[in-house]
Every structure is written in C-alpha cells, then in structure tokens.
Amino acid sequence: MLKRYLVTGLLVWIPLGLTIWVVNFLFTFMDQVLLWLPPAWRPEQWLGFHVPGSGFVIAGAAVLLTGFLAANIIGQRLVLWWESVLGRIPIVSNIYRSVKQVSDTLLSQDGHAFSRAVLVEFPQRGQWAVGFVVGTTGAQISRHLDPQALTVYVPTAPNPTSGYTLIVSPAEVHDVDMSVDDALKFVISMGVVIPQASPIGGHPAVPAAQGLGKA
C-alpha cells in the first residue's frame, strides 16, 4: 500500500518538478540576452531591481521586430546582404545554409513539412514505425524510383530531432488516425502516450499497426 502511494506521489511531482525546472531554465537562459545590452539599457537600471523573465520578453520582441523588418523590401535586401556575407565565410557558410534549409522547410507556411503522420515498415519487414510525410522527392531522385515516391521522416525516441529520412512508394505508406502533434507525443513518450481515435470514425494507431502486421 505504501509503495502504491509512493508511486502515485511520484507521478504527481515528477512531471510538475520537470515542468518547473524546464521553465526556470528557459527563463534563466533567456535572461542572459540582457547581457548583450549596454548596462544603461537593461530593465533593472530603470526599475531598480531584476525582473525574472524580462530577457524572454525582450528576446520575443526582438524576434517579432526582426520578422516585421524582414517582411518588407528593405528588410529582405538586408537579409540577402547578410546571407551573402555569411556565404563567403568558410565552414560558417556550410553550417548556416544547412540550418537555414531545415528551418525554411519546417517553418514554411506553404511548405509540406510534416503534412501528416503515417506508418511505414521500418527498420525491417514486419516492424512498423510512426513517420511524417515531408513531401515528394523531386525529379533528381524520383527518376530513379517511383515518380510518386514520398519522403518520410522517421524520428527516434525520445529525441525526435534525430531520425531517418526514408524514400518510399505511396503504396508502402499507411495513413493513421492521429494528428502530427499526437504522433509526436506517441514517439517522444516511447509509445506510452497512445493517441485516441478521432470522434469521427477511425481507429487508434496501435491497433491499425497490428492489423497491418498481420496482413
């Protein structure tokens, strides 16, 4: 009985403690942004005391201002100039271009990044993994494969930022009844958090995978 109470208490405090730790880490880390400002510009100089999270607010405002400036013609020219400068720096240019290509793909509003969650047989036949359709492969690759081949990203657990990029035929991709967010939760939790079926028909992802495996 005591063990049951102990486990129940841990299930309450561990998520809460980790959440507080992550939030505190983010706010503390973002407060370091204030060190980039001249001492006279820092909020504690105006108010007379340090305000936790002020770095987070200032960083968010800086990102919004940058986006506003980069959305007009003058800002776009400045961005192009800045990218041309970075493109002339050895090593830095390769890193910047690689990171920019990934961020443009993932954050593009009209892109196909992570358009839907699917099941693919991976890493071998009879074993299924949750993946995300990124888009089509393009002419240079599709000419050697199925013209309709899809690029599917299969993340690893519990760190979804690493994974495998697969090129598969549409016939080998099986849609599942879960959103991209729910699929990410399923992967990050190592399968512990099982998404529920949508209210309008469909079946949960896990039974669907079992059914495919038996086929």
Image (cartoon, grey):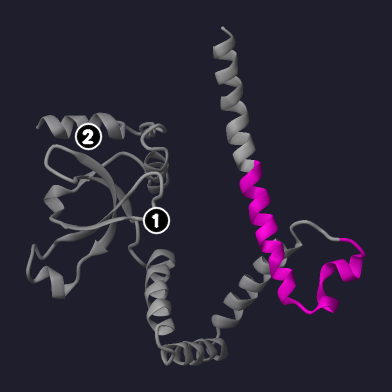
Give the numbered dot on residue 209.
2
Give the residues in magenta.
20-49
Q: Which sits earlier in the primary sequence, circle 1 or circle 2?
A: 1
Residue 95: which quarter of the image? bottom left
If the image is split into quadrants, where does the N terminus sit? Answer: top right
Q: Residue visible at 28% across and 49% down?
A: 131
Q: Residue visible at 66% across and 73% down?
A: 62
Q: Residue visible at 37% across and 74% down?
A: 98
Q: Mark 2 is on which residue type?
A: Ala
Left or right of 11, for residue 180: left
Please tell me which residue lies in front, 89 or 77.
Answer: 89
Left or right of 29, for residue 195: left
Q: Which residue is mark 1?
A: 161
Q: Judge whether residue 178 is colored magenta.
A: no
Q: How many marks?
A: 2
Residue 38: which quarter of the image? bottom right
State the residue lying farthest toward the right: 48
